[in-house]
Amino acid sequence: MELLELLTTIETKNINEITFEGVDVKPLNDFILEFGISYSTLDEADNDLGKMKELYLENDCDEDERESIEEEYDQIIEDFGDIANEEVFSQAYEVDNGQINIKLS
């Protein structure tokens, strides 16, 4: 399963950290939650963050929000575009003071 696909399944309540190969991907997960990105959204955009941005701006964005949304998408693409479609083969969970740490690889 690709990282993007997996992150659409994670509920972030009580999650302290999500890493993939040592890279903090919690901001990507938070972005997925903020924009309501689901597995069907990923499917429609062929798991491509750039295409997802285009579709969101075409369908779900009003003009007042456009610039800030474009900036958010661009930052996520810059930060995570190279690993978003990497395959996740292993998941490890740790509980630390009631908070969950998820380590993906």
Image (cartoon, grey):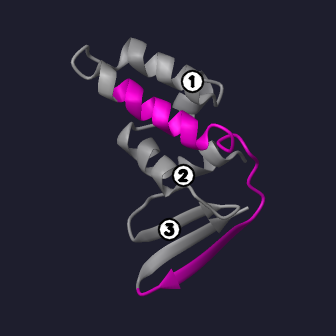
* Residue at mark 3 to residue at mark 1: CA–CA distance: 25 Å
**Label placed on residue 9:** 2
| Residue at the image position 50 percent from the left and 38 percent from the top | 76
Q: How many marks?
A: 3
* Residue at mark 2 to residue at mark 3: CA–CA distance: 15 Å
Residues at discs 2 and 3 in contact (Cβ within 8 Å): no
Residue 2 in picture, x, y percent from top left: 70, 45
Q: Quadrant of the C terminus?
A: bottom right
| Residue at the image position 55 percent from the left and 63 percent from the top | 18
Mark closer to the chain start, 3 or 1: 3
Mark closer to the chain start, 2 or 3: 2
Q: Is residue 79 magenta?
A: yes
* Residue at mark 1 to residue at mark 2: CA–CA distance: 21 Å
User: Type of residue at label 2?
Assistant: Thr
Position above or below: 47 against 83 = above
Judge depth for marks 1 and 2 and give the one in front. Answer: 1
The residue closer to the viewer here, 89 or 70, is 70
In the image, which residues are magenta?
69-97
Residue that badge 1 annotates? 50
Q: Is residue 11 left or right of residue 49?
A: left
